[in-house]
Each structure stands twice: as structure tokens, then as C-alpha cells.
Image: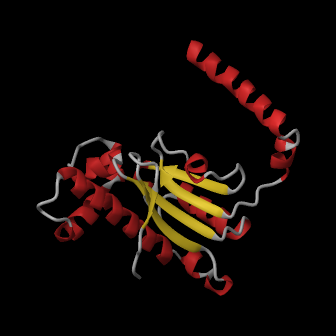
């Protein structure tokens, strides 16, 4: 319980610090949200989208799941995309993976992790399909990093194929971006994804 109490004390200190810097911070934030971006990323606890992009609260609508996967039968993700695109009118969707992703590693190593094994099945399929792209002389870490990139590319293509995205082409939005975050450098790599 001490850890929970500490978190609650830290929240009070954080809120007071925000008020000290900008007395209207919470009043303004509570009015409405008009994010420019929808971030679809991994649930990894080391990656905080607002922090690594230096964006303010309200600029980014966020959905996270293990290994940043896009499944059309994932009602949570599809609801988030619909709300972001239709109601919030986001201009950009960022699908961001990260090197060292546990979900990708589990798929690469064909680990049996119960529900997670089924969840990462599309990464296992991507690995099988694109294994020829991954250099045999590469280290295991380099091969896994390449699979992270291939997974992002695959998920971006899935996003672009969704009806809700196709229906927005007259509005010329949203733009879809495929990124990979490097935990070791703190930098984002922008992937060039061919149609």
C-alpha cells in the first residue's frame, strides 16, 4: 500500500506543479479535446507517447496494445479509430512500434504464452512471409529489430485498408505514419512504407 500512497502523493505534487506554471492548465484541458494525432502503439510501460514526442495533454489520442497490432475484429481498436477519425477529426494516425518489443520477440521465438500467443499470430505470419528479407548473417537482435519494422509496415497497410480510412479520402485525411521507437537512443525512426 505504501507504493499506492506514494503515487497519490506524486499526483498531488504534479497537479500543484502544473497549476504553479499555468493556473488555467486544468481548466483549459477540461474544456474539450481536439487532438491532431491518433497514436496506436505498444502497451510497453517504458513508452509514454506524450513524453517521447514532447506533446501536451490533449494533442494526442492514444490506443495501446501488445505489439501495436491492428485486427478488424478488435472492437476496442476499431471504436478508437472510428471516434478519432469521425468525431475528433484527427489529421494523422501514427502507428508506432519499438525495438525490443516483447510481443515481437514472443512471435519470433514462437513462445507459448497463452492468450499472447494468439494475439501475436499476425507477427508470426509476417515473420514466415518475410523471413527472406531478414539477413541470415544478422544477429538475433538485428533480425528481431527487422521484424519489428516489418510488423509496423504490415499494420500500417492494414490501417490503410480499413473502410473507415478509405471513406475519408475525400477529406484528404488522416495521413498514416509508420514509426519505430528506439529504447536505447530515445529516437523515433520514420519508416518509408511503399504502397
Q: The C terminus is located in which quarter?
A: bottom left
Depth order, front residue of 185/112 = 185
Q: Position of residue 100 (x, y in %)?
A: 33, 47
Task: Judge left or right: residue 164 versus residue 9.
Answer: left
Q: Position of residue 4 (x, y in %)?
A: 60, 19
Task: Judge left or right: residue 35 versus residue 106.
Answer: right
Q: Is residue 27 above or below residue 15?
A: below
The image quadrant of residue 157 is: bottom left
* Numbered-mark total: 0
Say which residue appears at 68% left-offset and 83% top-offset. Answer: 171
Q: The N terminus is located in which quarter?
A: top right
Say which residue appears at 65% left-offset and 71% top-offset. Answer: 91
Say which residue appears at 61% left-offset and 74% top-offset. Answer: 174
Q: Position of residue 72 (x, y in %)?
A: 47, 65
Depth order, front residue of 12/123 = 12
Q: Is residue 1 above or below residue 127?
A: above
Amino acid at each position: 500500500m505504501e507504493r499506492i500512497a506514494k503515487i497519490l502523493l506524486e499526483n498531488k505534487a504534479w497537479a500543484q506543479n502544473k497549476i504553479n506554471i499555468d493556473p488555467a492548465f486544468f481548466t483549459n484541458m477540461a474544456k474539450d479535446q481536439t487532438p491532431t494525432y491518433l497514436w496506436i502503439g505498444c502497451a510497453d510501460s517504458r513508452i509514454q507517447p506524450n513524453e517521447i514526442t514532447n506533446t501536451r495533454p490533449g494533442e494526442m489520442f492514444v490506443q495501446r496494445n501488445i505489439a501495436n497490432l491492428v485486427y478488424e475484429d478488435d472492437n476496442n481498436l476499431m471504436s478508437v479509430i472510428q471516434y478519432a477519425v469521425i468525431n475528433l477529426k484527427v489529421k494523422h494516425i501514427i502507428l508506432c512500434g519499438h525495438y525490443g518489443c516483447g510481443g515481437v520477440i514472443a512471435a519470433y521465438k514462437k513462445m507459448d504464452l497463452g492468450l499472447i500467443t494468439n494475439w501475436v499470430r499476425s507477427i508470426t505470419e509476417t515473420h514466415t512471409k518475410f523471413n527472406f528479407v531478414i539477413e541470415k548473417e544478422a544477429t538475433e537482435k538485428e533480425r528481431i529489430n527487422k521484424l519489428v519494422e516489418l510488423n509496423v509496415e504490415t499494420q500500417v497497410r492494414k490501417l490503410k485498408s480499413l473502410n473507415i480510412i478509405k471513406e475519408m479520402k475525400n477529406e484528404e485525411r488522416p495521413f498514416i505514419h509508420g514509426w519505430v521507437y528506439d529504447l536505447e537512443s530515445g529516437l523515433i525512426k520514420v519508416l518509408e512504407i511503399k504502397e
